[in-house]
Image: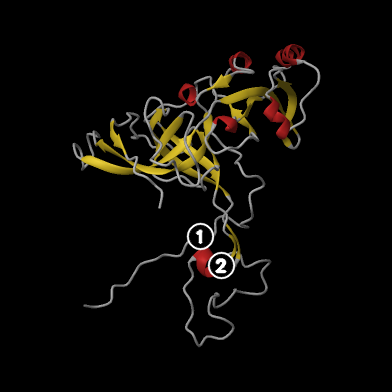
Amino acid sequence: MGHIKRKRPRRGSLQFWHRKRANRIYPRIRSQPIFNDVQLAGFAGYKAGMTQVFYVDSKPTSPTKGETLRVPVTIVECPPIKVIGLRLYKNSILGSAILLDVFSDAFDMDLKRRLTLPKKKMEQQRLKEAEAALEKATDIKAVVATQPKHAGFGKKKPEIFEVQIGGTDMKARFDYVKSVLGKELKVSDLMTAGHYYDAHAVTTGKGYQGVIKRFGVRRKVHKSEKGVRRVGTLGAFTGAKTHTVPHPGQMGFHTRTEYNKQVLLISNPKEQEINPIGGIVQYGVVKSDYILVSGSVIGPKKRLIRFGAPIRQKAKQGTQAPELQSISLRSQQG
């Protein structure tokens, strides 16, 4: 029997250059599509782990229609998020600039771990100023805070970030964020099972790595000069930089986006048990609402995953969630 050649294309697109570490451990969404629903354009949760589900394929054009499929899924725990403020933007010479901030008076004490809380209650006064400044505003976003204290892995310090608000009418968007200011929103209020979303997160950090692990370059023969685990040439010396040649450097802990991840289920442990026997390894026990995302999601366990409206959604993607037959609860304890 002859030797079977293993195909392993090089890893690491040179489209992202330079590959530097993310500025913070949770992502910033820089581009989102325009949609008509006046609501927050996404949610956020903590990656708990993976398991597998069984369901009958009901897609009419699928080659496996009617068959029972076993699909790997990612468990993302989604405690309620709290809308703590709103922010108006205006146009400036350098692009968008902050016009006005309004923060809710209903602060949680856990926010002290992240920012300095105001001493005076000025919510109503600032809302009147914001409403008067709507004519100058070009965009409006909600400022939300996560509540990791309700998750199952013992974190207390919340994350604070901006979330886009759908719709084109500025007054309607302002009235919406005003109505939810200081309130909690659940994942079932903003996401729908069966729909597709983009997952934004910071990938698992791997530190400083060489070209073999970082880009999948093959090792040179053992008699090569100047090293084996390196590229043969760095290219011309006369260029400003040889960015088309693989270099060693930072690998992982980059802000990345995965497109069109389908949500198969939105539930909580009381309605549909998800915790395996002994809990999820390196995470704990899921206590709050959770979602099941088809396939894998970037980032390690306990990392914050942000979900947003799909910017590259395919025209023929179905929105009907499959009916799950069972979820594997087999113990993960080694």
In the rendered view, tell whether residue 292 sits above or below residue 212.
above
Earlier residue among tags 2 and 1? 1
Q: Position of residue 280 (x, y in %)?
A: 44, 43
Residue 168 appears in the figure:
no
Disc on res. 12: 1
In the drawing, does residue 69 fall left or right of residue 303? left
Residue type marked 1 = Gly
Q: Relative to residue 333, is residue 156 drawn left or right? A: right
Instruction: Tell me the residue at 39%/66% (across/down).
Output: 8
| Label drawn at residue 246 | 2
Q: Quadrant of residue 273?
A: top left
Name the one closer to the observer, 276 or 116: 276
C-beta proximity under 8 Å, tags 2 and 1? yes
Which quarter of the rendering shows the N terminus? bottom left
| Marks 2/1: CA–CA distance | 9 Å
Circle 1 SS class: loop
Q: Residue furthest bottom?
A: 223
Q: Residue furthest right?
A: 119
Q: In the depicted view, which residue is nearer to us: 87 or 68?
A: 68
Q: Amino acid at mark 2?
A: Pro
SS for dot 2 = loop
Q: Which mark is residue 21?
A: none
